Amino acid sequence: MDWSQHAIPPMRLEPRFGDRVVPAFCERPNSLWAMISAAAAQNPDGEALVCGEVRLTWRQVAQQSAKLAAGFHKLGLKPGDRVAILLGNRIEFPLFLFGAAHAGLVTVLLSTRQQKPEIAYVLSDCGARLLVHEASLAERIPDAADVPELKHRISVSDDSASQFAGLLDNPPPSSPADVSEEDTAMILYTSGTTGRPKGAMLAHCNIIHSSMVFVSALNLTQADRSIAAVPLAHVTGAVANITAMVCCAGALIIMPEFKASEYLKLAARERVTYTVMVPAMYNLCLLQPDFDSYDLSSWRIGGFGGAPMPVATIEKLDAKIPGLKLANCYGATETTSPSTIMPGELTAAHIDSVGLPCPGAEIIVMSPDGHELPRGEIGEIWIRSASVIRGYWNNPKATSESFTAGFWHSGDLGSIDAQNFVRVFDRQKDMINRGGLKIYSAEVESVLAGHPAVIESAIIAKPCPVLGERVHAVIVTRAEVGPEALRAWCAERLSDYKVPETMALTSDPLPRNANGKVIKRQLRETLTAGA
């Protein structure tokens, strides 16, 4: 199986990041701003961004973004400087992203769930010069002494006191900054198994390639209308939602936060055609008692990823919205979102697969001793394409460990069959998948280790019918301490979804094998036996 039935633009082999050679689209914009500018030229009066009462056309978006670029310039920011964005889903988010692209700046996307220590680490590691943040999150902003390179802070709120308006009060520059395709456009920090986040460098060419893959593989056009219901600061929000709609010059409708009842109202009112969400979101929509009262007939593509879609959910959606094609998308921050996409018409027949390698993507399965395995055999998935990033910001060691000749080592165990369908079975990395949000056990264990009453801990996944997995902690304590105190300790230092929801406190040591490694399998069996 391949993409021959879809209108995929021609590709050719090109060098990338020095020593790689990958298939890339022959005709393409040469920067993120060039893609935004093309959308404004192609569909100037078409809706671009919708959020609450605010509606902006592509012409207005291009004009406001250029004014923001002038505002950045006035602050003394130069091409290549890092601008950190700590915003929820609001209209200013894409505008800051686009304004930074015009000015040749690198945007560093922060999650509003991150706590003060996590934010301080990212700001210091990337050397951010400007932080744009929600006014309501001011108490999480690190002290000036902890982030000496951070020269400017701009707060954004819904009231007239928002500093956003001041940045817009500038005549736009005569021309955008000169950037190269391989320059970094965004940095997204991804948790590592060691617990320290790594800054994945998404270059202009990575983002453009991924956006063109979405548009061509899913046949998106300027008539398409997408709801951004996932966080815009994640790679899915930034690429599958924001830049994919830039690429096709369609409309992006931004939800401040996902609520199934609000989603259905918005999807019906805005005649939404395309979304990418995690499976739990589709399920929550179906559970709404008034689901059948909404006209969702315009909805034609439902992308999903981050977790398997239950067969029952697929069957229910098919019965209720016959025109909706579900498309599994598998990827990561390091692959700038999609590595595989399941053509919607094939989903039902290949329910256990995450799809076909995206146009131009090469996926192989490697054995632990480093050779390619035959079709059907299970090993580590390696991915090479024009979407795969150069590496991690300021971290050559992590880059050399995770990339080989342009292939990214995913850490996922899977296989590829004779028809090219990819299956993902398990994770080599010790990771929990909570409704599509990835949690590395090592990061949570490291935070717990800092508590004076904790001797050791093990973080494992607790099965959950709605989210797939939840975070469970087995903690060996040396003093009287309750679960609430330990949860509060974690909540001050970790994003809320990483905080253990259930805990087992014990004075017995954790089970270990002959090498001293904790036997988590045993802990999982004990947990399920007691459930």
Image (tube, rainbow, N blue to C red):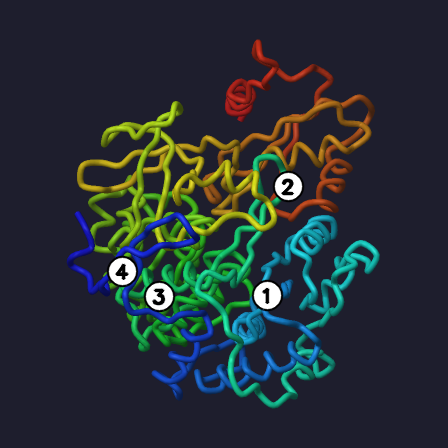
Query: Residue 144: where, in percent of width, then height?
Result: 82, 60
Residue under the point 68% across and 57% down: 127
Q: Which residue is mark 1?
A: 80
Q: Which mark is residue 381?
A: none
Residue under the point 34% across and 31% down: 366
How many residues crowd mark 1 within 10 Å: few (<14), some (14–19), many (20+)? some
Q: Which mark is residue 196?
A: 2
Q: Is residue 260 visible?
A: no
Report the amino acid beneath label 4: Ala
Query: Residue 231: where, in percent of width, then height?
Result: 53, 59
Q: Which residue is mark 3?
A: 274
How many marks do you count on the picture?
4
Report the amino acid beneath label 1: Gly
In primary-sequence order, the first of circles 4 and 1 is 1
Proximity of marks 4 and 2: CB atoms separated by less than 8 Å: no
Residue 407 lies in quadrant:
top left
Q: Which residue is mark 4?
A: 217
Determine the CA span between mark 4 and mark 1.
32 Å
Residue extending farthest front: 18
Determine the CA span between mark 1 and mark 2.
24 Å
- The secondary structure type at the circle numbered 3 is strand
In primary-sequence order, the first of circles 1 and 2 is 1
Residue under the point 30% across and 73% down: 221
- The secondary structure type at the circle numbered 2 is loop
Report the amino acid beneath label 3: Tyr
Q: Nearer the viewer, residue 347 or 411?
A: 411
491 left or right of 372? right
